[in-house]
Amino acid sequence: MPPLAVGSWVAAVEQTYAADAGMRRDEAIRSATPGAAFPIFAAQAHGLASCPMVGFDAERLAREFALAADEIPVLLVAVGHAAEGNRPQKPRLPVAQILTTLQQPEVDMPKPSDILLTALAPAVWGSTYIVATELLPGAPPLSVAAIRALPTGLILLLLVRQLPKGDWLWRSFVLGALNFTVFWALLFVAAYRLPGGIAATVGAVQPLIVVFAASAVLGTRIRVLSVLAAVMGMAGVALLVLQDGAVPDMPGIAAALGGAFSMAFGTVLTRKWRPPVSALVLTAWQLTAGGLLLLPLALLLDPPMPPLDAANAAGMGYLVLFTALTYILWFRGVARLEPAAVSSLGFLSPLTAILLGWAILGQALSASQMIGAAVVVASIWLSQRATPSRQVHAR
């Protein structure tokens, strides 16, 4: 049941009480209150209310409303329905947010299937490097990004037949810009200005950004294991892809950092706003919005797209198809897993790229790359272990 605002809850009590003359007021309260009960003790345990028992005559309230002591809803505290003369302290969070948190079921740990399905996304993204170099050499990068996003988003919109409304119209463009437009544009700038190893290593700071952004935006606790896992992942990526003698370029490094910040905040805001739709619908909205924003950039900054041969068309089709599938899995994971745990899975992208280069193109694997691969895998495992033992499911 969705959380009730204070005014609507009070109105619901009065309406329920007035509709049935034979109903006692305590029955009306139970009928109008979301769930069976929301004890103030639960609010304290969740850290959602600041000392709600101070100055609050719980026993007298229970007697007057014929409620058991453990049935006093936290909403009574918030609306001030205490004994006369008592002023309960204001909760630290909005009442609606308290109720939402208290209503959400808790589970022991994220399901392994959720982690594996989410991990498929960055693993497949790692294959785009070989597709781009072998099937789309020399293609204008922003044009490829726009073609990758916009047609995919429009096809998904035709399938879901659901457009964003209200706040979700502008939120879709914000998330589409962060997760696709800005991220992909800066990614290509970094790729042009930096050796691939430096670009990938700087971009690997994203999970560390997510740890601190989630703390600032979502209020999640910064865990030592999450920070350690993010630093380990960066080190592993550096061992995988960094080449000796690579010369850094400051504008390129700034672009790589900007791309990492963009997708990091896109991940955190997606979790904060909790879209009221499925991952499929959310992916359709974001890809369409991101593609619409990429299109003018491609028209202004890229040279004309050359004619496509069969290999180019196959590469483009691969990118369009797997962009849709992987981002559906990715946003599903963002809704179900902690942001830090999700972002750490992104380390699989450079790992997959290196392994595919070895398996398909015959590229050599050095000892440092093998060590880097092991460090990346260990960092992902550590990040999942850092997830709290009790986690709230997304709706």
Image (cartoon, helix red, strand yellow):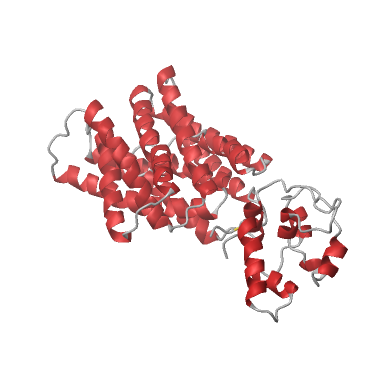
Q: Nearer the viewer, residue 93 or 329?
A: 93
Q: Does 68 sit above or below residue 345?
A: below
Picture coordinates of residue 96, whole percent (x, y): 62, 54
Residue 242 appears anywhere in the view: no
Residue 352 appears anywhere in the view: yes
Picture coordinates of residue 267, whole percent (x, y): 49, 43
Image quarter of residue 226: top right
Q: Does 185 sit above or below residue 349?
A: above
State how many labels appear.
0
Left or right placement of residue 335 versus residue 79 in this view: left
Left or right placement of residue 315 versus residue 254 in this view: left
Image quarter of residue 245: top left
Q: Nearer the viewer, residue 376 or 120?
A: 120
Picture coordinates of residue 136, whole percent (x, y): 23, 38
Image quarter of residue 62: bottom right
Residue occupying the point 72% across, 54% down: 78
Residue occupying the point 27% across, 57% down: 158
Q: Does 174 sit above or below residue 104?
A: above
Residue occupying the point 23% across, 27% down: 300
Left or right placement of residue 239 versus residue 142 in this view: right
Residue lying farthest to the bottom in this orientation: 22
Picture coordinates of residue 122, whole percent (x, y): 43, 46
